[in-house]
Image (cartoon, helix red, strand yellow):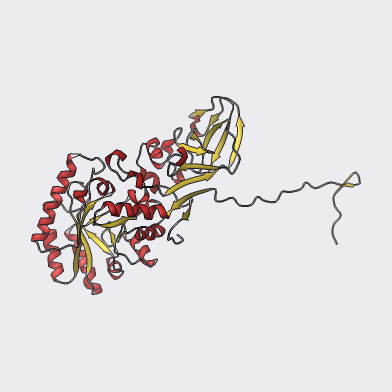
Amino acid sequence: MNPEPPQSGGRVRPVAAIAPPAAPAGPQACAVIDLDAIRDNVAALRARAHGAEVMAVLKANAYGHGLLPTARASVAGGASRLGVAVLAEAFALRAAGITEPVLAWLSAPGAPYQRAIAEDIDMAAHSLDQLREIAAAAAECGHAARVHLKVDTGMGRGGATASDWPALVEEARARELDGLIRVEGVWSHLARADEPGEPSIARQLAVFDEALDVATRGGLRPAVRHIANSAATLSLPESHYDMVRPGLAIYGVDPLAPKNHPLAAALRPAMTLRARLVQIKRVVADTPVSYGHTYATPRPTTLAVVPLGYADGIPRSASDIGPVQVHGNRHTVSGRVCMDQFVIDLGDDDAAIGDDVVIFGPGDLDAPTVLDWASAAHTIAYEILTRIGDRVERIYTGGPHAPM
């Protein structure tokens, strides 16, 4: 039996109508990845390489764009090889059924080299100890390992020094004769290729040429010699050798000033980072905003909350300066970037909860770009892209892709 309704003065109180929930309008924050742009960027770089192979660099979750969809888009654009930093990234490619040659170049002692050999993954070797560990793994699994010997030509980071290089070449040739390894490549990395005309570039190429001569005299016949990164692919044809290794450029971000090469217009940024406003409120003049009160409203205005913060990759160093776009109008982060959110001062512009905010994208219609954010945060575009966190949903448009 139903209980009697509550009464007051002998009459039933009316119950306020509850509005049904609004239909979903998309994620509150997302990175939209244009796979056609990645494909077309790789194709443009391949044309620029003048016959050299293209290895698409996919480290760090493809610079934040998503490893597997980016790998497929890169292959569709003409990349014949794929490059990653760590073996876990290479294993993920193989698990997804990607069969193109993959090079992983950063491994500590005790790395799972046997698994890498079994899954047909190329590995870098920069020292006698590492080469011997890879050869021992090959002996255990009964299959030769493919290695790319790395020489330090002036980066001062990974790679054998000029004095250690002859011994590494000798060891590699001995292990080839044993049937334990195959030297697939000889490679290095340029430190200042994004500064065309910088004297160290020519010096590094000269050291690389000498290292290649040592390798040839030592009996090695690598399939690919490679040193060119994105900047060198775009501006240094003498550095292309047998293969180029573009990273940032395949995502449509130019590492050089456009005046330095003719390909800039052909590169289109693939990622658009956007969010939806979660709160709007009108405030009076002199209202302090966010931690530390580094910003106060100069007049009566509208404040809006954007649900992205430094946990999602928005750099805290861009507080009070990072640019965004709402309804075609530019605004700036107001106050400090918080862990999960930041505030923008909209002035008297119209806006509503749920409205779209572009943090950065290709730069169409005066929207901010990742280079704008890099400048605001006093860093580089690489860092902005790779810091976009897992809470930010990736949405793919265009070409071949797979769920992450």
Q: Is residue 307 left or right of residue 154?
A: right
**Left or right of 242 in this view: 322:** right
Q: In the displayed structure, would residue 330 be above or below residue 213?
A: above
Residue 397 percent location from the top left of the image: 47, 55
Q: Residue at x 25, y 73 (%)?
A: 141
Q: Quadrant of the N terminus?
A: bottom right
Left or right of 373 on screen, residue 212: left
- Residue 164 in sight: no
- Image location (x, y in percent) of residue 194: 26, 42
Whether residue 356 is visible to the viewer of this picture, yes or no, is: yes
Q: Residue at x 47, y 50 (%)?
A: 32
Report the residue at 83% width, 46% height from top: 14
Q: Is residue 91 above or below residue 191?
A: below
Tell which of 119 and 242 is nearer to you. Answer: 242
If the image is split into quadrants, where does the C terminus sit?
Answer: bottom left
| Image coordinates for residue 364, horizontal then vertical, percent | 45, 42
Q: Residue furthest right?
A: 10
Residue 128 placement: quadrant? bottom left
Image quadrant assignment for residue 216: bottom left
Q: Foreground residue, 295 or 146?
A: 146
Which residue is the extreme one toward the bottom?
142
